[in-house]
């Protein structure tokens, strides 16, 4: 695993550039760009900026979600809804290229459904697990990432790729990627634009395993921390 820590005063533009460049590189190399989106407020302006790109062939981009809240797709807490409003509609991403987690149905059923969808694509590529070209993550104040929280059973999951999870804030019921799936990515990028999290970032990068984000270690890929200053 190769790790780089980038500090920037142009957070949104630099984040969009990382995604843009990864897209063109993956499409040139493999004919497809598999990108996992993260939720929350931090990526909103990034997705809006990315949607302005005129040279990304969105028909060759496959989008997944690292986690989702168990709410309908039009709910204001839905990660899908945020991505749809900021990126999917603006960039005219083909609907079939967007793998939505169905947060409105039973969490276990939705998790298995999503897992099977990713496994089907992975089998076409001869992969043990679906390998994202770029997987975006955020960082919570408690060190959580995706919907893997401190003390969560998800920290010990070794087999499943997508599972139900419970968060400390409403809506508590979530669906999340597991660490084996996250760490199968070719490139994982943490997007953190909050100086108040500097201490937490230091703990995670130093390897404090009580912080879920410290467990993110791409097995054969790259890890980037993009930090707004």
Image (tube, helix red, strand yellow):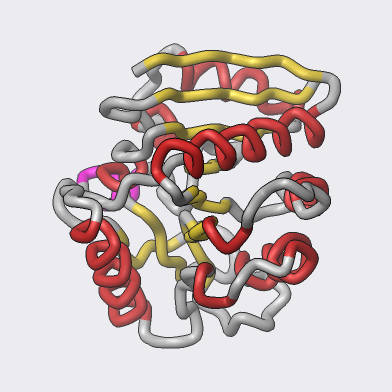
Q: At 54% from the left edge and 56% from the top edge, which residue is drawn?
A: 61
Q: Is residue 42 above or below residue 92?
A: above
Q: Quadrant of the C terminus?
A: top right
Dominant secondary structure of the magenta stretch? helix
Asked if one can make out residue 170 in the rendered structure from this viewpoint, the answer is: yes
The spot of residue 73 in percent (x, y) is 61, 81
Quadrant position of residue 19: top right
Q: Which residues are magenta?
A: 151-156
Q: Quadrant of the N terminus?
A: top left
Quadrant position of residue 150: top left
Q: At 50% from the left edge and 51% from the top edge, which residue is drawn?
A: 36
Residue 18 lies in magenta, yes or no? Answer: no
Front-most of residues 80 and 156: 80
Q: Is residue 102 above or below residue 117?
A: below
The spot of residue 115 in percent (x, y) is 28, 66
Front-most of residues 102 and 23: 23
The spot of residue 107 in percent (x, y) is 36, 77
Residue 154 lies in magenta, yes or no? Answer: yes
Q: Is residue 7 left or right of residue 174?
A: right
Q: Is residue 24 left or right of residue 10?
A: left
The spot of residue 2 in percent (x, y) is 40, 15
Q: How many marks?
A: 0
Q: At 31% from the left edge and 63% from the top edge, which residue is drawn?
A: 118
């Amino acid at each position: 695993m190769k790790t780089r820590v980038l500090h920037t005063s142009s957070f949104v533009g630099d984040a969009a550039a990382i995604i843009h460049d990864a897209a063109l590189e993956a499409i040139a190399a493999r004919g497809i760009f598999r990108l996992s989106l993260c939720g929350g407020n931090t990526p909103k302006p990034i997705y809006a900026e990315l949607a302005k790109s005129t040279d990304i062939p969105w028909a060759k981009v496959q989008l997944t979600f690292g986690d989702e809240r168990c709410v309908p797709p039009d709910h204001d807490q839905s990660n899908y809804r945020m991505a749809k409003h900021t990126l999917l509609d603006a960039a005219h991403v083909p609907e079939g290229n967007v793998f939505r987690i169905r947060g409105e149905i039973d969490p276990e059923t939705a998790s298995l459904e999503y897992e099977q969808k990713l496994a089907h694509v992975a089998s076409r590529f001869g992969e043990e697990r679906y390998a994202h070209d770029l997987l975006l993550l955020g960082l919570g104040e408690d060190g959580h990432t995706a919907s893997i929280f401190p003390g969560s059973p998800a920290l010990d999951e070794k087999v499943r790729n997508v599972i139900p999870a419970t968060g400390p804030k409403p809506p508590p019921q979530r669906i999340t990627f597991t660490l084996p799936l996250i760490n199968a990515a070719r490139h994982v990028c943490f997007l953190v634009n909050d100086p108040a999290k500097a201490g937490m970032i230091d703990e995670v990068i130093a390897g404090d395993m009580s912080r879920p984000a410290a467990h993110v270690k791409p097995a054969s890929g790259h890890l980037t921390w993009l930090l707004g200053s």
